[in-house]
Each structure stands twice: as C-alpha cells, then as structure tokens.
Image (spheres, rainbow, N blue to C red):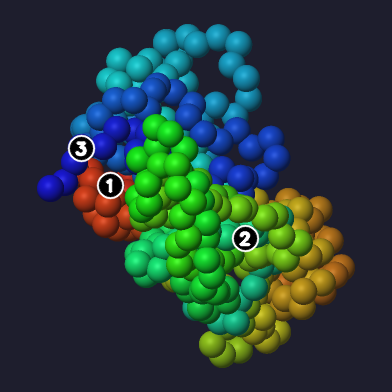
Amino acid sequence: MSKNPNGHEIISLFETMYPKAFAMEGDPIGLHIGALNRPVTNVLIALDVTEEVVDEAIEKQAGLIIAHHPLVYRPLKTIHTDTAYGRIIEKCIKHDIAVYAAHTNVDIASGGVNDLLAEALGLVQTEVLVPTYEENLKKLVVFVPVSHRESVQQALGDSGAGHIGNYSSCTFNVEGTGTFLPLEGTKPYTGTAGKLEHVEEVRIETIFPASLQRKVVRAMLAAHPYEEVAYDIYPLENKGNVLGLGKIGYLPEAMTLEQFAGYVKERLDVPAVRVVGTLQDTVEKVAVVGGDGNKYIKQAKFKGADVYVTGDLYYHVAHDAMMLGLHVVDPGHNVEKIMKAGVQKQLQQKATEKKLAVTVHASTINTEPFTFI
Ligand SMILES: [Zn+2]
C-alpha cells in the first residue's frame, strides 16, 4: 500500500541524497516559503523560481517546488504584490505551495549538478575539483543476542552503515557472554526480573558517515529485540568521502578545442558557447563547474585541466585564464538545467522505493534569460 506523504517526508528523503550539511557556508538553502506539514501529491523540480514556474506548479497541482537557485537570496524589505517578485510569493501562499531551495548541496553531493555535467560530457576517471567537505566517520558497536545477529546486520547494511570503498554492509563480529540483572518492573526479552542472566551475544561493529547517525541507530534499534539496547558510538579520526565543487576528468578521446566547443554545445544542449584559447589546440583533460565558476580557474589549472567548462566567465578572468595557458569554454549558467531531470529521476525512484504516493515532475519552463542571436 502506498501512502500519501507530507512535505517533511519528501524533504527528509531528498536530504538523504542532498544533506544540508554539504552546502557552503551562508548559502540560504532550505524552506523559503510555506510549510512542510501539508500532504503533497506532486513535486516540481526547478532550476529557478520564476512566475511561470509557479504557474506550472499550480497547473500540475504541485504542493512543493524544490529549486536549485534560492528564491530569497537577500533579505526582503517589502513584499509588493504588484511586482513579479511579490506575485511569486503571493501565488505560492494562495495556492499552498511550499518552496524549498537546495543549492550548493546539490552542486556538491554525488549525483548532483557537477556529476551530471561530467557524465553528460562523458568524462572518465573523474575526481573532485575543489574539495569542500570531508565526511566524518563514526563507529557503532552493538551487542546482539546470537539469534538476531543477521537481522541486525541486515538493518545496519540497509541503513547505509558499513560502506568502505566499493564494499557495502561491512561489519566485524565477535561472540561473547553478556550479563544483566533485570530489575523490578522490567519486561526482559529473556530472563526473569531479579536474577542475573548470562546470554550468548555477538558484538557487531561497523562504520558509518556521521550524517547517517540517526538513520543507522534507528534501524539498529528497530531490528534489535532488547528493551534496553547496549550500544556505543565512537567518533573516528579516519575521514570518509571527499566531496566538493566541480569535477575534473578525461574525455574518452582527445579533440581540438574547436571540436570540444561543438561537443559541449551538443552534450549540454546550449545554442552557443564562448571560447578562450587557440581553437586548434588539443584538449583531453576537462574541469567542469556548473553555474559561475570564475573563482576556481586556478584550481582547474593546478589540477592539470586543458580546458575549463564553466559559466558567467568575466572578461578579466578570461584574461587570467589566457595568462595561465588554460582554455575555457563558457556554455552559460543555464547548463545547470541538467539538475531538473537528474533530481526528478533520483527523487522519484526513492519515493517509489518508500511506497510514497507522489509524482515528481521536472519543470519544463526554460528559465534561460539570454537569447542568442
Ligand atoms: Zn547556479
């Protein structure tokens, strides 16, 4: 049986893929308008929240818009409903539409904007261009009666614990004897109140990213038969996955800068690109940052990129790139539109797995402000 979720349930599912903790400091992510406690049957994934996008949400009966670019970027002093901006807010409130922003967390998380762009460009052997976040790891040790060893191991693995490199569900187990004295008023799973019990138990230990702690502990407790579960959580010095802005990797085969410019137009579905560098030069190693990547040209050069793909390139930064000997292809900021279909697919899949009766739509509104003539 599928169930009708509310906004909170959808957002908590979304945040398992795009945790808020991944966002850059000061990025105004999260709920911007409305409330999440209402039932939601349709969700709209958008790059920007324009009035047309809100109209699309009304038409699709979407109670929640998840947008990449935050609607309220600077503090508002007034909300005048005779301006386009005020009307956006007015329409959302009148139609019970919540607006939630997921910005740099969607740039940084795996499967997000930069992964989608690297994938669209067919890059291989990719790595993070600008590291911004290193996962903290923790260790969970739990004592389980032998009879429940497998169900607890399974629950831990399903919750995402025990992920090491390309291996999942890693645990270490050692058997021993647990003792306990059930006090008066207890309902012990085994033994009787007032008598010291000896039980064959397994000590299961596993590792997990700190961001998953609540999920892992909840799953472990649900699978464990005891009334009072004995478990320890240790902080670790080991670091987990490195995440960050942008990707760098190799094209399947080298090509000229001119060919690459055409390739970018086609792969990222843009009508035009701006190119910095000699068109006949050969390029193979590519760095990509979705949106405005002006700040990171040095990192692209330092990591050995032949060409850097990013939007909103400033005139003076283009000169800096030339001086560094770095080629640049600027396909515009709007290539981030790639997140609409990417996130739609991921969220729909998660919701279906969880049997939530919700349809996730990718916005079909083109929010590119520029016309290329
Ligand atoms: Zn952007």
Q: Residue furthest left?
A: 1
Residue 138 figure quarter? bottom right
Q: Residue at x 54, y 87 (%)?
A: 252
Numbered badge on residue 360: 1
- Badge 2 local density, few (<14 within 10 Å), some, or many (20+)? some
**Amino acid at pointer 3:** Asn
Question: For the residues carrying marks 3 and 1, which lies nearer the camera in this image?
Answer: 3
Q: Residue at x 76, y 53 (%)?
A: 295
Q: Position of residue 1 (x, y in %)?
A: 12, 48
Instruction: State the residue in front, 119 or 161.
Output: 161
How far separated are the C-alphas under marks 1 and 2? 35 Å
Is 339 positioned to the left or the right of 28 in the image?
A: left
Q: Quadrant of residue 165?
A: bottom right
Horizontal side of residue 266 vs 325, given as left or right = left
**Residue 327, horizontal then vertical, whole percent:** 72, 72
Residue at the spot 56% in from the left edge and 36% down from the top edge? 29
The residue at which mark 2 appears reads as: 139
Residue annotated with mark 3: 4
